[in-house]
Amino acid sequence: MISLAVGTVGVVLIITGVAMVIQGWAGRRDVGRELAQQRISFPAGENLPAGLTQYAGVQVHTGVQARAYSELIAVHVAKATGGRTYSEIADECQNGGRDDERLARLRETAFMGQSLRGALLGAYQAWQVTLLVMGLGALLSAAGVAFLALAL
């Protein structure tokens, strides 16, 4: 009776683990497909910041590349805003700069840049979650095999 229960748990763990690995791969494929559809490419040449030069001319297809591109956006936004965040620029607008057209454009630039970074970082996080799901699925499957071995 105990052998049957242990074997049943083993089979359930294997099935669950395999399903998790499949879902992780499917999620990873979906994230990659969505990134590819956006046609985001790093600029070609050597004008990339340090640490991003290996991505020159590369199209973004992975979560890791999405994170790297978000860093490129961060560099450009910081350069355009003098290192100020959207919140800081918005505060400046609210405190007397409402009619300043340059400040309004700067606020829009900061907002768009930080929004794009957030979306790309969300893709990176989803990419990482798929890796976690696949790893846990493999772990569950291995535990299932161990349970089956014990049952036999």
Image (cartoon, helix red, strand yellow):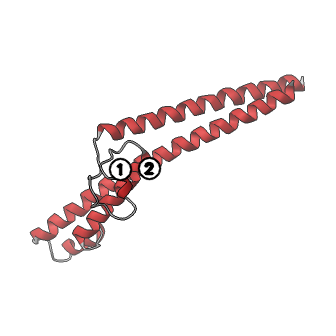
The residue beneath circle 2 is 64
* Element at label 2: helix
Q: Residue furthest bottom?
A: 96
Q: Residue furthest right?
A: 1
- What amino acid is at disc 2? Val
Horizontal side of 134 relative to 39 (left or right) equals: right
Q: Residue furthest front?
A: 45
Q: Are marks 1 and 2 in contact (CB under 8 Å)?
A: no
Residue 144 location in percent, x, y? 74, 31
- Which is nearer the eye, 63 or 97? 63
Above or below, comparing residue 60 to residue 11 in the picture:
below
The residue beneath circle 1 is 119
Horizontal side of 24 relative to 49 (left or right) equals: right
Residue 107 can be seen in this image: yes
* Element at label 1: helix
Above or below, comparing residue 22 to residue 135 in the picture:
above
Q: For residue 59, which quarter of the picture?
A: top left
Alpha-carbon span between mark 1 and mark 2: 13 Å
For the point 26% across and 52% down, which residue is it? Answer: 44
For the point 25% across and 57% down, which residue is it? Answer: 112
Horizontal side of 94 relative to 9 (left or right) equals: left
